[in-house]
Amino acid sequence: MPPKSSVSENIHKDEPAPKSSDQIQAESLKEKGNKFYAMGKNHAAIEEYSEAILFCPNWAVLYVNRAVCFRRLGEWRRVKEDATKALDLDRNYMKAHFLLGLAYASGEVAQPPVLDSLTYGYSFDGTIPSNSVFSKSPDSSVASATSRLISHLLNGNGAGKKNIGVQNPIPDPSAAAAKVAQAERDEDESLAISIKHLSRAYDLAREKNNNVSAQAEVWRELAVVQYRQWKRQAAAAKSRRQALQNEIHQLLGLELSTPLPPRWAAVFKDLEKLDLAPEAPPEVPSALTCPLTTSVLRDPVIARPSGRSYERAMLLEHLSKVGKFEPVTRQPMTEADLVPNVCLRHTIMQYLHEHPWAWGEA
């Protein structure tokens, strides 16, 4: 059974291609790909979409459909490639922005993982390969000394050659730390790019205003990535504060276990607030949450009978499945009584920007 469909997995079926001979062939191949996709045969679908691209390379839908298949297979680099190509052809393609945002959030499309590039091996002549962490050490004397040591061990006596292995030499800590730091920067950059594309996808979904479920899915993914980014920033801020506290302890001649004087303790309390990383985040104000879900409002609408604001999707579901009345006051109402609360929506986005921990409630 193929997985449940989602906004990025809803491949395009009805959009017609311009009817030249090549494009008619591309349309036929696309339909075959759609059928394979519906059957869960992603590799077969990819082959059909790829052949269709040969006939119609400027049809953005083909790249998005193929990217959806790659997403199912977890091939995020291919998702990135196809979504990027689709945006080159149509910069306002909502699903392409969404898929590209997911690809960057996967953490698999930036630089290769740090451990993949940490090569600790040596050649048997005692030299250091160019891809070794030692060859990239900022301290050339470390690399030189290490090379001489390995050469001595390998070329000394037979016992040394036999007993001193070359599989797991000790890496240069400074080079390894630099690579870890670079990996951290790469992940931060990937999350920032992901947020940019997911935000654009959400704006485009709202502009269409005809697919509430699509808007909801994009919002959920955006909230997840925003919260991940805040968690990373909060952890980094806490680490910086701890390092600074340790330095202050040393300057004051105090043991690390000794509490700081009240004046310094107050300074670090203020720093904690400035870092937007509270140890115990407060609750989101109820005025910014939906009475039905208690979650942060995404698309607030005003119910005319009472003036209360609700999440649009939840209120529409209530009117459809429960009854034509307002949930809290039980006053009669219909869909015609819903008014978008634009001011509240902007207020919520500003609140989330200033209190990023609140994305966990969104």
Image (cartoon, grey):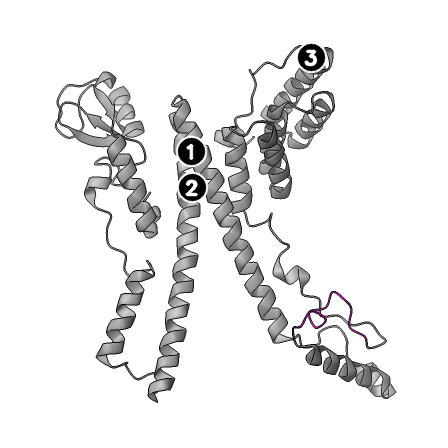
Front-most of residues 315 and 263: 263
**Label 3 – label 2 distance at C-alpha:** 37 Å
Highlighted range, magenta: 127-138
**Label 1 – label 3 distance at C-alpha:** 32 Å
- Is 253 drawn above or below residue 293 in the view shown? below
Which mark sits nearer the N-terminus, 1 or 3? 3
Measured as percent of width and height from the top left, residue 116 is found at: 67, 60
- Identify which amino acid the numbered label 2 is placed on: Leu
Q: Residue at x 32, y 46 (%)?
A: 352
Q: Is residue 256 visible?
A: no
Labels 3 and 2 touching (C-beta < 8 A) = no
Which mark sits nearer the N-terminus, 3 or 2? 3
**Label 1 – label 2 distance at C-alpha:** 8 Å
Residue at mark 2:
222
- Identify which amino acid the numbered label 1 is placed on: Tyr
- Identify which amino acid the numbered label 3 is placed on: Ile
Front-most of residues 163 and 148: 148
Q: Residues within 10 Å of mark 1 (few under 14, many from 20)?
A: many
* Left or right placement of residue 155 versus residue 328 in this view: right
Labels 1 and 2 touching (C-beta < 8 A) = yes
Which mark sits nearer the N-terminus, 1 or 2? 1
Element class at badge 1: helix
Q: Residue at x 57, y 59 (%)?
A: 183
Measured as percent of width and height from the top left, residue 96 is found at: 54, 32
Q: Identify the image quadrant of the N terminus.
A: top right
Which of the labelled discs sits on residue 202, or is there none? Answer: 1
Q: Residues within 10 Å of mark 3 (few under 14, many from 20)?
A: some
Residue at mark 3:
24
Residue 148 is one of the magenta-drawn residues: no
